[in-house]
Amino acid sequence: MRSSAWLLLLCSSLALARDPFQPLAEGVCQPQVAAPDGWRLQGIVGSSMHYVAWLVSPQGKSHRLTSLAMLPHSPWQVAELTARSLILRATQSCPPQQITWVIKGGFYEKDDAHLLPVPQRSAEGQ
């Protein structure tokens, strides 16, 4: 009986042992996460059950993101996706960080005609 108690004590101490030469594990908390600079929200399509956001990276590559997807090569995750907005949250940030991107304009809004470039014909080509 006495030897089994020692064996139990020895096994439990091995389970709790750690390498004293390794630094203590840091918390999973990141103090400040850099904002995703250069990304552009091109649009959001879908229905209330499943929206998909189209983003363009700083390198010009298109990315399709759904709810809970990670922004490529960053700690930002899609937290909420609606017909008009995209909310990103930084995973593992100590003070919770959040970015909201909103689509400008209305559903059926078009550019004003006076803002569009008008092609000019040269006098020589006529």
Image (cartoon, helix red, strand yellow):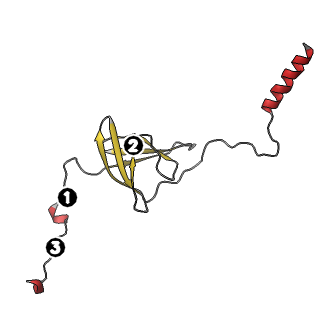
What amino acid is found at the position of numbered circle 1 in the picture? Asp
- Percent position of residue 38, x then y: 43, 60
What is the residue that sits farthest to the top in this orientation? 1
Task: Say whether disc 3 or disc 1 marks the residue closer to the N-terminus.
Answer: 1
In the rendered view, would you say 9 is above or below 82?
above
Q: CA distance from mark 3 to mark 2?
A: 39 Å
- Kindly report which numbered mark, 3 or 2, lies closer to the viewer in this rendering: 2
Which residue is denoted by mark 2 in the rendering?
66
CA distance for labels 1 and 2: 28 Å
User: Which residue is depicted at the point 28% across and 51% down?
Assistant: 104
3 or 2: tag closer to the N-terminus: 2
Estimate how packed mark 1 is, as few (under 14), some (14 to 19) or many (20 or more) residues with alpha carbons within 10 Å.
Answer: few
The residue positioned 35% from the left and 44% from the top of the image is 52
At horizontal 20% and vertical 58% (from top left) the residue drawn is 111
The residue tagged with tag 3: helix, strand or loop? loop
Residue 119 located left or right of residue 82 = left
Pointers 3 and 2 in contact (CB under 8 A)?
no
* Extreme residue toward the right, this view: 2
Label 2 environment density (alpha carbons within 10 Å; few <14, some 14–19, many ≥20)? some
Q: Tell me the residue that label 1 is attached to.
A: 111
Q: Look at mark 3 in the image and give the residue it sits on.
A: 119
Above or below, 98 relative to 6: below
Give the secondary structure at mark 2: loop
Q: Position of residue 97 (x, y in %)?
A: 50, 45
Amino acid type at image mark 3? Pro
